[in-house]
Image (cartoon, rainbow, N blue to C red):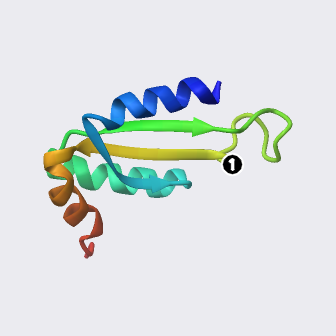
Amino acid sequence: MQFFINIIEYLLSSKKTLVYTAVKQQDYYKIISRLEAVRMKYRVSITTANNSATRGGPHSDLGKVYKIYVKKHDESKALKTINAKSD
């Protein structure tokens, strides 16, 4: 399964660049809302090692990794937006 995930990420990365990786859903939503506020298009890859045997159960946020990608020419703007101080 990991093999297919690596292939998909490779194909995606040829047109997009990774700008943020989050392990908490709260951080994921915070970053996505910042990108949406400036109308930036993005893609998200969510990988999980979670199963029912993992602590927290099948509906837990444990083990999830959110990778946020933008177009290569939007990378600078995305990083400025992500790292901007919020009031």
Q: Residue at x 56, y 54 (%)?
A: 23
Residue 20 position within the rendered picture, expressed as x and y whole percent measured from the top left: 38, 55
- Where 52 sits versus 32, above or below? above
Of residue 87 and residue 8, the one placed in the foreground of this image is: 8
Residue 16 position within the rendered picture, expressed as x and y whole percent measured from the top left: 27, 39
Quadrant for the N terminus, please. top right
- Where 79 sits versus 72, above or below? below
Of residue 76 and residue 87, the one placed in the foreground of this image is: 76
Quadrant for the C terminus, please. bottom left
Of residue 47 and residue 6, the one placed in the foreground of this image is: 6
For numbered disc 1, what is the local secondary structure? Answer: loop
Q: Residue at x 41, y 50 (%)?
A: 29
Q: Quadrant of residue 76?
A: bottom left
Q: Which residue is drawn at 72% across and 38% down?
A: 50
Q: What residue type is labelled 1?
A: Leu
Taking the image as shown, residue 5 lies to the left or right of residue 13, namely: right
Q: Residue at x 21, y 53 (%)?
A: 75
Q: In which quarter of the image is residue 45?
A: top left
- Where 75 sits versus 82, above or below? above
Taking the image as shown, residue 4 lies to the left or right of residue 79, namely: right
Q: Name the residue under label 1.
A: 62
Taking the image as shown, residue 86 lies to the left or right of residue 8, namely: left
